[in-house]
Amino acid sequence: MNKQRAIIIFTLSLSIAMTGCSTEKKDAALGSSAQPTVVRTAIVKSTPLHTAYNLSGTLQAYEENTLAFQNGGTVASAYLTVGTAVQKGAVIASLDDADYKLQVAQATASILEAQAGIDNAQANLQAATSAIQSADAGITGARANVNKVNKGARAQEKQQAQATVDKAQSAYNKAKTDSERTQKLFEAGAATASDNENARLNATAALKDLEQAKESLSLLLEGATAEDHQSAQASFQDALAGKSKALAASEQAAASQKQAHANYEKALVAKGQAELALSRTRLISPVNGVILDKIVNTGDLVASGQAVYRIGSIYRLKVMLPVPDSEIKDWKKGQQVELALYEETRQGTVSNVYPSTSTDTGRVNVEIVINNPQRDWLPGQVIKAAQQVTDKNGILVPAEAVINTGSKPFIFKDIQGKAVKTPVELGNQVVDNQLQIVSGLREGERIIVKGAENLFDGNAIQSEEGGRP
């Protein structure tokens, strides 16, 4: 590196010497001029010293995302073009969602159907509970009838038998009403055949209980016979059987209710899945960024996972610099790097030094991150880079501002409109065709950076700004 720097300085010094010789000849021939010479001037500043490595690389978005639909279908909208800025959360494309909306509607209908099933199962369970209560009453009545037959009728027994008839009549009326209601539900498709049959059997059993209660009362009034005793006992057994049947109906109704609740939960899950599928017909930007590439168009048929857009965040950019393996030791994570794009320079930061050398180039990639708040630097542009290898500052002036006649280099200062010849001492730093000045200049002084080769010491000058430093 020192050898390369020495060659650069020698070359620039030789050029300066040639310019100086030419100037000496003009000085001898022309002398001082009465007319001010138009020159370009600049204020001397202290700047960080860099080493120009002449590295270059192509800018990339700091973060890139390839976006795709999770569902397949026909693209309904994909109108954003490359370069369009998008906000995080914005919809940037969509699929035809007619089928997905239909799935949501079907799932909603299934939920309503399942809810109706729950209501029907609850009604059947209540009917079964009533049947059990009625069966208990029938058992009680039958038992009393047996006792009455065995003991003989008394006035109060007759009254009790009549009460049993009344109660059996009430139970039958209720069972009949339940059976008629279940029949209507069955015809409407809201009750199962099993539920309808159970209700009908309950009504038949209640009717039988009523008839038996009436017969018991009649026999009681007429007086018990052997047949009466047998009949009373048979009625009691029938009442016991009726309760067993009512208990079985209750268990069946409870099972139906449990199944109805399971169907309802299943319908809820199906609707959730349908709504999720519908939401996936919209493609959402996950970041604030810019459309870098557009892969599909409106009307295209896409599969699940097929790329639609490539989007990148360009508020920060990155660039890969191919650094020679022999120089990689000078690059460390966190170092500042000067980057130039056309006439603009910015500071970047080393974010990563890759751990291996490219087999193709023999160079090591160094990743640089650059802030780009105005988004005016774009992915794909080629930048040049120079690394800051020291934290020292110094004075750098354009090489054309330095004149060397063979003895000692000098520059011209602009002092109150006069060109003042000033000897300077050069350092060993050369940055972007600028020479380091280690003595002879101070910050804040104005020097001539263009047109110095036409001047004599003391010439009147007319200055314009715009050069370096």
Image (cartoon, rainbow, N blue to C red):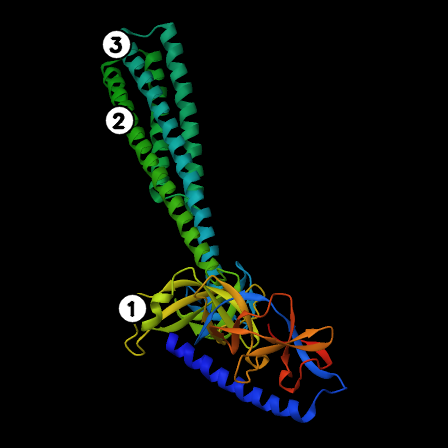
Cα distance between the residues tagged 2 and 3? 22 Å
Q: Is mark 2 on a helix, strand or loop?
A: helix
Q: Name the residue under label 3.
A: 150
Name which of mark 2 and mark 3 comes first in the sequence: 3
Nearest the viewer among 108 and 18 is: 18
Amino acid found under the numbered disc labelled 1: Ser
Q: Viewer-nearest of labels 2 and 3?
A: 2
Q: Is residue 91 above or below residue 191?
A: below
Nearest the viewer among 373 and 226 is: 373
Q: Viewer-nearest of labels 3 and 1?
A: 1
In this orientation, does residue 315 appear?
Answer: no
Q: What element carries label 3?
A: helix
Name which of mark 3 and mark 1 comes first in the sequence: 3
Q: Residues within 10 Å of mark 2 (few under 14, many from 20)?
A: some
Query: Splitting the image into 4 quarters, where does residue 18 fall?
Result: bottom right
Query: Splitting the image into 4 quarters, where does residue 395 fall?
Result: bottom right
- Image coordinates of residue 249 in percent, x first then y, are 32, 33
Is disc 2 in contact with disc 3, using a CB cutoff of under 8 Å?
no
Please give the name of the residue rendered at 55% of the width and 85% of the height, measured from the top-left corner: 405
| Count of numbered circles on the image | 3
Amino acid found under the numbered disc labelled 3: Asn
Q: In this view, does 10 lie above or below 108?
A: below
Which dot marks residue 20? none
Cα distance between the residues tagged 1 and 2? 89 Å
Nearest the viewer among 26 and 349 is: 26
Q: Name the residue under label 2.
A: 241
Please give the name of the residue rendered at 44% of the width and 55% of the height, measured from the top-left corner: 276
